[in-house]
Image: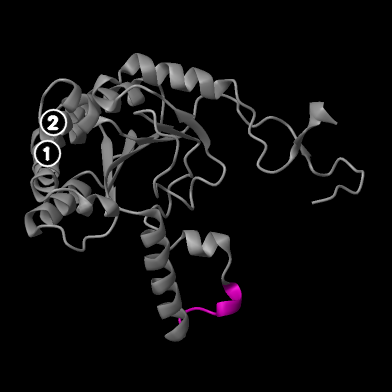
């Protein structure tokens, strides 16, 4: 866009403190295990222990919402034994931690498709969401069997169905309306997205919601990630100035 010479497109820096919503792509479990001569499922098991620590740390650091990318729609391409191990770890995490999370005021939300998931896993997801629905101290969002593009397709399918049924006028469709059909409806977009493991891509994670997220890539493998590393990431975020397409006043 070409400026008309006025300062109408200038903004003040919008980083004023800690991020409200942090998303984490938890990468590196398999490489961590391989480097130690262990099986990939054991790497994922270690990763779950780190999840417990990071959830607690995020709450302590004042983060309001934490979204963890735990199983993508592309992960079905992995060996069946590894996929089953990931399902088992979700079962273990919910059965072991649900009571504690509920008592601490954590609201659990699981985003993604239910297609292909074992019936008991779907039941656990429903149980976790139902039992923590009224909590408000902290939002823990788990992206499980999730893909950003697939989410947008599902949202568009629901939206177009409402248009065809006469419940919605096509002329009313805008970004906010489409966002209300996404799995993350009602959640703030992520301020910061962290990816561990050294890769530098989003891998289909929150592709709509991450449009203006600050991105931070860490070489640390997820099983080695710590509360101290999360604190460092938050401190890095504080140094950034979010422009949202505008120009900072001081740059004029």
Q: Secondary structure at mark 1?
A: helix
Q: For the magenta stretch, what is the residue range?
A: 167-172
- Please say if the residues under marks 1 and 2 sit with CB atoms less than 8 Å apart: yes
- Residue 225 % position (x, y): 30, 21
| Residue under the point 18% across and 31% down | 48
Q: Position of residue 69 (x, y in %)?
A: 31, 41
Q: Is residue 123 left or right of residue 192?
A: left
The residue at 39%/52% (across/down) is: 184
Q: Confirm whether residue 42 shows in the render.
A: yes
Question: Earlier along the polypeptide chain: callout 1 or callout 2?
Answer: 2
Q: Secondary structure at mark 2?
A: helix
Residue name at image x 46 percent, y 50 percent: 207
Q: Is residue 248 left or right of residue 121?
A: right
Q: Is residue 238 left or right of residue 147?
A: right
Extreme residue toward the right, this view: 5
* Residue at image location 9% in from the left, 47% down from the top: 84
Residue 78 lies in the magenta-colored region: no
Quadrant in which residue 34 is drawn: top left
Quarter the C terminus occupies: top right
Asked where in the image residue 219 lies, by quadrant, the reply is: top left
| Alpha carbons under labels 1 and 2: distance apart | 7 Å
Please give the label number shown on residue 135.
none
Query: Is 209 or 128 nearer to us in this picture?
Result: 209
Q: Residues within 10 Å of mark 2 (few under 14, many from 20)?
A: many
Task: Name the residue that disc number 2 marks.
Answer: 45
Give percent across and percent down for residue 179. Answer: 48, 59
Residue 89 disc label: 1
Q: Nearer the viewer, residue 46 or 66?
A: 46
């Amino acid at each position: 866009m070409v400026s008309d010479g006025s300062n109408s497109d200038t903004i003040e820096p919008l980083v004023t403190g800690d991020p409200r919503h942090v998303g984490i792509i938890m990468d590196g479990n398999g490489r961590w295990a391989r480097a130690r001569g262990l099986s990939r499922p054991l790497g994922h098991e270690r990763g779950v222990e780190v999840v417990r620590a990071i959830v607690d740390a995020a709450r302590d650091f004042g983060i309001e919402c934490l979204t963890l990318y735990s199983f993508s729609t592309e992960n079905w391409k992995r060996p069946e034994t590894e996929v089953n191990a990931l399902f088992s770890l979700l079962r273990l995490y919910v059965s072991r931690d649900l009571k504690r999370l509920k008592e601490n005021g954590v609201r659990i939300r699981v985003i993604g498709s239910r297609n292909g998931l074992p019936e008991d896993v779907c039941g656990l997801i429903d149980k976790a969401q139902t039992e923590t629905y009224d909590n408000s101290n902290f939002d823990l969002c788990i992206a499980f069997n999730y893909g950003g593009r697939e989410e947008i397709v599902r949202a568009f399918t629901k939206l177009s169905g409402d248009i065809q049924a006469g419940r919605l006028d096509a002329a009313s469709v805008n970004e906010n309306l489409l966002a209300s059909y996404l799995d993350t409806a009602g959640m703030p977009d992520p301020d910061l997205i962290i990816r561990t493991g050294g890769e530098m891509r989003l891998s289909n994670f929150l592709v709509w919601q991450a449009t203006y997220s600050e991105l931070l890539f860490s070489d640390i493998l997820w099983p080695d990630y710590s509360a101290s590393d999360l604190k460092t990431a938050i401190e890095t975020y504080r140094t950034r100035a979010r422009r949202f397409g505008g120009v900072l006043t001081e740059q004029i």
